[in-house]
Image (tube, rainbow, N blue to C red):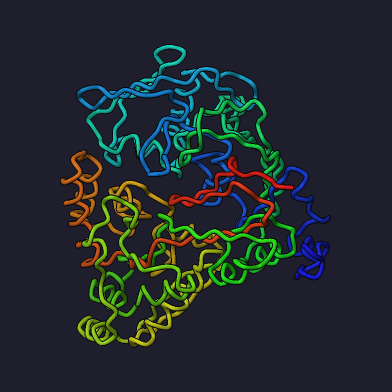
Amino acid sequence: MTQTSRVLAPAVLAAVLGLGSVLPALADGMVRLALNADIRGTNPGVTRDGNTDQVHGHIIEGLVTYGSDFSIIPMLAEGYEISDDGRTYTFNLRKGVKFHNGAEMTAKDVEWSWNRLAGEESESHCKNFFNGQNNIEVTSAKSTDEHTFVITLAEPYAVFLATMARFDCGSMAVLHPDSVNADGSWNAPIGTGPYMMGDHAPGRYVELNRFADYTSREGAANGYGGGKHATVDTLRWEVVGEGAVSKTALQAGDLDLVDIDAMTAAELKDKPGFKVDATESAVWDTYLLNSSDPLLSDVQVRRAIAHAIDPQRIMAAITEGFGNASPSPVPPMSVSYTGVQAQYPEYNVAKAKQLLAEAGYNGEEITILATRRNGAYYERALMAQAMMMDAGMNAKLKVVEWGSQLEAYRNGSGYQMQSFTFSPRLHAGLSFEMFTGGAQRKAWKSPPAVDLVNEALRVSDPAELQAIIDKLHQGFMEEVPAIGLGHRTLFTGMSDKVEGFENWGAGLLRGWMLKVNG
């Protein structure tokens, strides 16, 4: 790339990124990426958000994971067997797998790791997926010999393996016990992945170093599993905040691969020195509505908001025409996505006004919470605000840091409506479960909906599952606990020196596939 193509000189960009010196070159075996916010910690499944999961996913692995077609495939397990009654899962572990400290993985390590995330004393939200609070109750999780780990359930559960593979739980990652200190406090992740934790300067960058003794599965990459034949020595994520900064850094040659918006993708796709990838994902962009709020507890008001918002127009605007509305939480690439899931409340301003009048709405303020992080959170909120105002609502916009918005989501309070995004859930039942239930963070607490979700997670017959998912979608449209926009088209811009990048529906980077050309 020529000097004239640079938008900011490296020294200036380094100052923008908070660095003391110019970043190292890609040719040195490092690929430099961007994070719109720092990782929340180094404890997989405990201190987490979407950014953190993506970084952790290079360090850790579980017994099973998701393949490219969203099927469940073995990862650290060589294979597994399910008993005839559907209650007992026997995992036969791969032999010769090494942790980052050189120790060989055994079933005892798997047992310790399971208890770390799913035990009674666990600090992870993941334990509630396996202790009966969310239907699955694990009654026993034990090593029976050096390479065999057995889990027993209180009753059969169709999506048990899919729940184990959840990205927000690090696929129930297997770690070495030395990841914690002698007093039980967290130290650092000692995983089995193709990369291990390197330097982390909070608020500035996080580095992962290639694990030279990584034990890969044979064959090609397959989703988040398969062969992981890493060649890049260091993956370095710069914390760059706003998307405009990462775009500038990419164009300046100071970052090598970044998430970009649709407008930037259109600018870069034919520009020498760059490549652009556009992939539809299972990442769901939505507006959460807090039905515990005094005003939004009235379903007529929630329905009015739904009729006031035009998902197709918003999706077209934020994707430069690439994306389409798909308001159902079930992603279009799912086998459970049918014509029923394609239905959503029509954009009808007159209907919205009628519903507001019936509800006795008198100009009360409706505040939309948003952040300026990448992902068009702010832009989505801004467009919703304008549409709601057109329908006669006193819509206000409140912009906060991502951490503050995430805290409001987790507490289930402190907001009326928020522009939000859910990371992929690759089973249709889990697509609804992510916002349905009794937990304070869940937006849809309706008992009939909760019962349907629980049923969806138990049945194994495809026809029965589809009937339940259809009922859930119909209830979703009637009760409006959230307003779906669509499943995000992910745009990635990169230097033409980066090879091997492939996005997929789950939307998670697979850094082990990257190569540096020149």
Q: Nearer the viewer, residue 73 or 87?
A: 73
> Left or right: 329 with respect to 31?
left
Quarter-of-image position of residue 4: bottom right
Q: Quadrant of the N terminus?
A: bottom right
At horizontal 74% and vertical 64% (from top left) the residue drawn is 252
> Left or right: 147 with respect to 308?
right
Quarter-of-image position of residue 166: top left
> Left or right: 36 with respect to 451?
right
Tell me if I can see residue 55 in this picture: yes
> Left or right: 23 with respect to 456?
right
222 to 319, vertically: above or below? above
So how many labels did they put on this image? 0
Measured as percent of width and height from the top left, residue 220 is found at 51, 35
Quarter-of-image position of residue 35: bottom right
69 to 73, vertically: above or below? below
Measured as percent of width and height from the top left, residue 456 is found at 22, 46
Measured as percent of width and height from the top left, residue 198 is found at 69, 39
> Residue placed farthest to the top in the image?
145
At horizontal 31% and vertical 22% (from top left) the residue drawn is 81
Q: Nearer the viewer, residue 351 or 326?
A: 326
Measured as percent of width and height from the top left, residue 3 is found at 82, 66
Tell me if I can see residue 289 in this picture: no
At horizontal 34% and vertical 88% (from top left) the residue drawn is 392
